Every structure is written in C-alpha cells, then in structure tokens.
Image (cartoon, coloured by chain):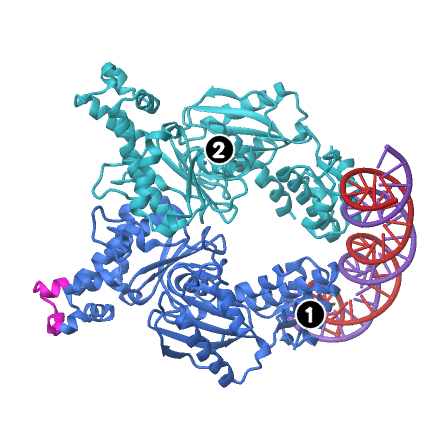
Chain colours: A cyan, B blue, C red, D purple
Amino acid sequence: MSSLLALEDTFLAGLNNVERRKYVQKIKIVKHLYVKGAKTNADICGRFQISAPTSTAMLNELIAEGLVEKQGRGKSIGGRKPELYGLRDKSLFVLSIHMEKYKARLAIFDNNNSPVTGVQTFPIEVTQDLQAVDQVHEQAMRLIEASGIDPQKLIGVGINMPGLVASKEGNNHTYLRVPDGAESLQQLLERKFGKPVFIQNDVKSATLAEYRFGLAHGRRDVLVLSMDWGVGLGMILDGKLRSGASGFAGEFGHIPLVEDGRLCHCGKRGCLETVASGSALVRNAQEGIRAGENTQLQALSESEIDQLEVEQVIRAAHDGDQFAINLLAEVGLNLGKGIAILIQLFNPELIILGGDMAQAKPFVVPAIQQAITIYCMKQLRENTRIVVSELGRDAMILGSVATVMENVFETHLEQM
Amino acid sequence: MSSLLALEDTFLAGLNNVERRKYVQKIKIVKHLYVKGAKTNADICGRFQISAPTSTAMLNELIAEGLVEKQGRGKSIGGRKPELYGLRDKSLFVLSIHMEKYKARLAIFDNNNSPVTGVQTFPIEVTQDLQAVDQVHEQAMRLIEASGIDPQKLIGVGINMPGLVASKEGNNHTYLRVPDGAESLQQLLERKFGKPVFIQNDVKSATLAEYRFGLAHGRRDVLVLSMDWGVGLGMILDGKLRSGASGFAGEFGHIPLVEDGRLCHCGKRGCLETVASGSALVRNAQEGIRAGENTQLQALSESEIDQLEVEQVIRAAHDGDQFAINLLAEVGLNLGKGIAILIQLFNPELIILGGDMAQAKPFVVPAIQQAITIYCMKQLRENTRIVVSELGRDAMILGSVATVMENVFETHLEQM
DNA sequence: GGACTTTACTAAAATTTTAATAAAAGATTA
DNA sequence: TAATCTTTTATTAAAATTTTAGTAAAGTCC
C-alpha cells in the first residue's frame, strides 16, 4: 500500500520543499482521476501545467504505490492511442454513515462510488448528548470487519447528521454535543476510528451528492432543497458547497414567511416550516380530517390520524383525493414563495427538489412555479430551472462519500 | 514601461510554457503586492512556494520593468533586516467611473488607491439605450488628458452602474442595453477606450470596496446592504464577490416581504423595497404630513412635500422629531426582518450597512437588531455583527477601482 | 561584545523542460 | 487493398531552470 494517503506525521515532516510539492501534485492527480475518471497523460499535463516526462514519472510512482493503473487506451483521431490512467479498482474505500433522528444507515463504498457492502440500517436515537456515538462506532467497526477490506485502504469516514453542524469546527451544535472545552466531535470520532472523519449536515451532504453524482453535476450555481418533516437548503455557489461563516448557512426552514404565523418548534412564529413542510402538510391534513372535510383519509381511526405520515397524504393525492391535492398545492405555494426569495438572492441556474415531498411532484411543482411567477423578477426566474432529484433516497448516503472525497485530499494538503 | 501588462497578443503568443508560467507568476506577485502592500522576498517565497533565488530573480525583472521598487527595509526580530519590495508609486493607474441615474462621477486612481485627479461630477441620464456611453467616454478622455498621466500606464477602466449587470457577459440588462446580436457593452467600451473595461452593478462594486478598503477587509463572509432610494445587496462569500449564475444575485429589494402589500415599481406586490427603503420612508413621510401628523415637516409647502428627500426625514429625526424617528424605526423593523432572512440563509460573520440611510444609524440600527432577535435563530444571530460602513460616499467610486484591480490581472492570465 | 538569527547572494546539485526520435494509429492515395 | 502520409503518443538525452547548500553580511538580544 502506498504512503500517499498514509497521513503519518513523521512521513510528512521529513519532506523538503520539492518533495512536498511533488506529494501535493500527486494527491491532486489522484483527486482529479477520482472526480473525472481515467485520463490520459496529455490531459494531466494540460490540467496541471507540467511536462509529459514529469507527469509520466508521477503516474509511474502512483502505479508503483498501487493507487493508479493503466486502463487500456483512449480514442485517437489520427495518431497513436493514448494510455489511459485511472484509479485502481478497490484501491480506496470510504465508510459512509447517514444518521437520522431515529435510525442510522451505514455502507462502505469504493473509489468508483459503488457500495462494496449492502446498506445496513439500524435503529438509534440521536440526542443532544453523545450516547449514539459509541453505538454507531461499534456497528461501523463490525461492518468494516465483515466487509473484509484491508483497513489500510479505508481512507476516511463520512458522517452526515441533522442539526446545526459546524463542519470545519468539527461539532454539531444541536445534537451529539461535546462538553465545553473538550475535544470536538470530529476529533473524538477520529480518535475512535483512527482515520480522518468528516461530519456534515445531512442536507449539505445531499447537496454535494447532487453536485458529484446528480443533476447538479457540472453546474456552478445550484440550490438543493430537501423537503421532509422540515425543510433544508444546501447551496453550490461558484462550484463549491457553501457553509457560511460558522457552517450554519441554509437555515431556510426558519426564515420568517408569515406575519404573526403559527408557533414553530424552533420557538419563533411564522417560519417557512410552519406552512411549507411535511409537518405543516400533516398538521393541515389532521385539522381538515377532524373538521370533517370530504376526503378518503376520513377512513382513518383517531389514533391513525394522530400518527399520520407525509406519504399517506401524498398517496391520497395520487389517488385523486381533492382534499390532499389542495393541501399539497397550498404547501407548494408557500414553498414557492420561499423559493422566490432564494432565486432573488442567489440567482441559481438550477434548483433541485429532494426529500420525501419530492414524490408529490405533480401536485407541488406547478404551485411552486406559480408562486415564482408571482414573486420573482422576470430576468431572474427565466434563468432558473426547477427539477426533482433523481438520486432519491441515495442522496444522503452518497453525500457522505462525496464529503470524504471532497475533503480527505485537502486534509493531506493542509498538513503541510 | 514594462510589457507585463501590455496585453499584446503577439507578445503572449510568442511565449513557451516556462515563459508563460513565469509571466503568470510575475502577475500574481504584482497583484499580491497591490493587495497586501510591500512585502519581503521571504514572504513571496512562502506565499508562492518558490525558492529565494527564483523569487529574487523575478522581483529584479519587475524592478527592471519599472513596476516594482525596493521600499526600504522591514522589521527584524534578531537578524538582518529584509528588503521590502512594493509596487512603484504611480506605475499603474485606473480610471474609475460611477454612474448614477442622473449623474456620473469620474476619477483616476493610482496603484496606492489614491486619486490623482479630483473626483469630477457631471450630469447625465442613464437610460435604456446607449446615449450616455458617448458622453461618458468623452468626459473620461478629457480627464485622462488633463491628468497628464502616461496613457500606457492606465491599465483599465472600471464602471459601475445601477441595474441588472451581467458582469461576465459584459452587459447591463436594465440600462445601456445593446442591440441584440451586437457586441456587448463591455466590448463596445473596450473598443472606445482601447483598454480593458470592467462593468459592475453599483452595489456589488461598493461591496468589493468594503472588502478591499473597508470594514469587510480580511473577512470571508460578509453582506453589504446599500440603502438609498432602493435597497441593494452585495455578498462576499468565502472571500469572493458572488454574482450568481447570470450575475443578478442580490436582488434583495424585491423579495416578497408583505402579503398583499403595495405595488412596487418593479410590478410586483409587497416587495421589501415597498416598506424598507428610502422611497418607502419618503412615501410614508409624505402620507403622514398630509394626514396632519405632528411634525416639523409640516412647515414644508405642498411642492416641497412632493420633492421630499430621504436626508430631510433623517435630519428631522436627528432634530428630535418623533414622527420622523417613528418612521425610521418602522423602516428599520421591516429591513431587519429582511436581514433576518439573509442571516438565516447566508450565515455571514458581518453585515455592513451603507448608502444614504446609514446616516440614520441611531434610529434604524436598534430596530434592525430588534427584528433580528425576533426572526433569527439564536446560533445564527449570535455569530453576526452589524455595522455601518465607514467608507461612506467613497465606497462606490473606490468600488470600480477594486473591480479593475480584481479582474485586470485575471484577464491577463485568461488570455493564455 | 559575543551568541544567535535572518537576509542576500553564489555555486553546485537536482529537477524539469524542451527537443529529438521511434512507435503506433488513423487518413489518404495509388 | 496496400503503401504512404500525417498525427499523436511514449521515451530518451541534452539543455535550461530551479533548488539546496554554503557563506558573508547585517541585525537583535543577552
């Protein structure tokens, strides 16, 4: 196994300026090959402004280290076919963990972003304190063992979670809070795993997945909305995931939208989430059912009404239930008003709608479009497309893979 | 004069890879010295990861080209004092133009950002068509001639203007619109001036000025609000001025804020500008005066009321006029609600208030703070400071200097 | 005043690039 | 269809550039 991603302090400290620059260059090549796939020597020369012999020398070193391999030859339009250099299959692995409030999902992915284990789900409660950490770590270690991969080749662990995650600081300010003055959540996890660990807010993570693997691929200014029980926002601005000064940017669900509106669970009144979210949808449905509205949901028992889920309302709408359709349209209009604000402020080229509510596309999207037409300036709305995510449930777990791949190379570079 | 910023195609085309890399490096050094001031050889070595002999060689070339000079020696903490290298005084000049709806301001600045001419103001009307362009160009050429500077040393022209400016595309989509299919406004201006020209929206330009010369200096996530007749927003995110996909980001004045509100001049209803701007302030004042409110502004004649200016209301407030104070507080509350949305979405470390309304600081800022306390999540508002610009009226004209300096070097690099 | 730092400069050593060449592959032509 | 031409890649050796190491000069601190 190579020392390229070894992260041993003694190894890095022993490098002089030239060796370090070469090391940086090699890591950049590895990241380039990961993001863009197999490339020719000429491509790498052009991309990094180095000469062919230098590039070849570095690629040969990477081959010797077992990270890169020749992967056949590329196309030619009248000359010798170029050798293709790509990341060697199964040379790198990432452990991806997606934590929700009441369950966690784990999987190991290889450098082609393919899962090498099935996605394991187990129940867990994410609370303010750290009790969930040990459980997740234990499950994760069991998964690594069961997978049979060489632990040396596991380059990092990505964990996404709900709450206000300060990714750079390495802490979650809502859940899994560490005691004051102690090591950060990230440090704690890195100590446990003995690997680089990256924590990220769930929606920001999904946003990165859309950027690397989804509809945002190749675009530079994209907003990703995740609509489940609450509403979250992730943003790719100028080709980068933006987190704001403290890492809390994108708290879209709690912008004021309704004057003297309902009390939100966050303690404020009239937040967007009180009128445009899964919870608002369910609450409105419950109130309507109890008020005797004409809907197939009247068939539910009182306790079933109490336990009503977003999916049930969406299913009713797909069945043609006008009450459910109206509720979804109302949510769509409110969400659209919020999206209009986003378009005015961010001027994105694309907005991707994800999360459970995305399944209600035919009932929600027209309402969103209508609101945008009302509340957006022409020049801005004309340059923004609105689409529904194609990654679906995978966005989250792929997101933590992307988070690791995005940051693990930089970590190596920062150390120097 | 050096050929470093000559921009002659033939010169650039004749460079091989090594020469080009050196050229890029030298331009980067020049920009570094411009942005950071005089630096030591060691600083440049560290900043660009090159060795001392290489760095010295390039600095000597820049000295020979007349762009750089030795500027004494720096401090030492126990060793030989280092030579300081800085941009030679009066070696570069920028023509800065600030266009408002009914007047334009022009000045020439040197590489120390000091005006080498006074700021010239002349009346002009910026309309949808191009008629203002010739007038501005003529005035500008007269100013260059009168200044007596070597035209060779004028490296670029920066022009800021109101409207939806697509800076990269080089067009203004609101004013000074070029015919379809014709050259862009930027190209037209570059042809007339024979120099690189950069156009930018006035508020974004002022934002860049705050970043380079004002309170945003050294910060990475800052929002700048410009409050005059309308309200504009510029954003520094992760240390860069962000413009959005089409260049129209920051249309804060026209986000929906009031349900079924007043008709805005943009054609929509309930825009933030209808309740939180200089025009809203004046309109409310006019309505109050005519309704007989108890205020010193009752002394105005009917035609003076028609012509009421923002400054008059602010002056009344400073005189202790409670009617004016209440009006400003109301505007502040509404603006604060809008700012709360911005904080939730962008999580900035700093918000700078600029424009005419900034003079009403003691009456507006407490109201803004109050609104933020109501509408912002604790973790977000705690990490955001709100201050009033210290650049004042200079922000705009300095902004176009910053715009040129920000882009002119990149232009040279892109050519290659 | 001596010890220790830091800078500035030079020359040898190391690295990278360019140029040159051979091989490989498609395009063109007989 | 075969031979030739053109284009592109891969590799090597000479040339150019950059770096490291070494040294003298210039400061600061004790």
Percent x, y of residue B42 = 67, 64
Percent x, y of residue C2 = 76, 69
Q: Tell me if I can see residue B347 in this picture.
A: no
Q: Chain of mark 2?
A: A
Q: Which residue is mark 1?
A: B59
Amino acid type, label 1: Leu
Q: Are marks 2 and 1 in contact (CB under 8 Å)?
A: no
Q: Which residue is found at the position 48% from the left and 20% from the top?
A: A122
Percent x, y of residue A397 = 51, 29
Q: Which residue is mark 2?
A: A160
Q: Chain of mark 1?
A: B
Along the line of sight, the residue nearer the viewer: A379 or B89: A379
Along the horizontal axis of the image, is B153 left or right of B385?
right
Q: Quadrant of residue A195?
A: top right
Report the Cα–Cα distance between label 2 and label 1.
48 Å
* Residue bounds of the magenta highlight: B287-302
Q: Quadrant of residue B302?
A: bottom left
Percent x, y of residue A13 = 70, 46
Callout 2 secondary element? strand
Q: Which residue is found at the position 67% from the left and 62% from the top?
A: B25
Callout 1 secondary element? helix
Along the line of sight, the residue nearer the viewer: A126 or B111: B111
Amino acid type, label 2: Asn
Figure quadrant of the N terminus of chain A: top right
Along the horizontal axis of the image, is A312 left or right of B60?
left
